[in-house]
Image (spheres, rainbow, N blue to C red):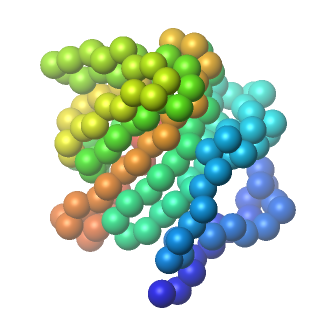
Amino acid sequence: MEVKYNDSTHNRPWGERPVDAPIVPIDIHAYTQQLMEEEAWQKNDRNAITVFKSEGITVTIIALHKGAEMKPGNVEGTGIMTLQVVDGHVSFRTEQEMLDLHRGQIAALHEHIPYSATALEDSICLLTMVRTASQKSGNNDVPSAVH
């Protein structure tokens, strides 16, 4: 298996880190600290880092300031997903239901279902997006939390 790395960016210029390998260690606490120390956290209502990305799955740690909302830009491009609240309090809504998520709680959602998630206090979430076979060949839409 070829190990894949992220590219250095203006916000994270210190180098590459593996995002797809036979095993990728993910220290949620360390990444959370990193997110909260970056300028993007100070200037915006959110900050995020993708910690694993393969053809079928993307795992992203998202730091949300109170009031920040995330939702997909294109529902047709959304896959099966989970949103786990690592710390904080998030309101997760679909057209049919509203969930009040606290630390340690997870919402799981099938593909193509419109949703939004709003931080009711500063929150840390773990977003896992699973691409189905039909999505692997098409356009995949990542929630606006990570843009």
Q: Going by the image, does 26 lie left or right of 14?
A: left
Classify 75 as above or below 91.
Answer: below
Where does residue 28 sit, x and y in percent of width and height?
A: 62, 45
Say which of 5 and 25 sits in front: 25
The C terminus: image quadrant: top right
- Above or below 101: residue 46: below
Q: Quadrant of residue 74?
A: top left
114 up-or-down from 136: above or below: above
Q: Residue at x 25, y 38 (%)?
A: 109
Camera-nearest residue between 74 and 132: 132
Left or right of residue 33, residue 86 in this image: left
Residue displayed at 53% across by 32% down: 86
What residue appears at the point 67 percent right and 41 percent down from the top-left corner? 29
Residue found 56% across the figure and 53% down from its top: 50
Q: Is residue 102 visible?
A: yes
Image location (x, y in percent) of residue 66: 59, 15
Residue sitting farthest toward the left: 96
- The furthest residue to the bottom: 1
Whole-percent x and y of residue 23?
A: 53, 71
Horizontal and vertical percent for residue 22? 50, 77
Q: Is residue 96 depicted above or below 13 in this figure? A: above
Viewer can see residue 67:
no
> Across the whole image, how many numbered discs are drawn on residues?
0
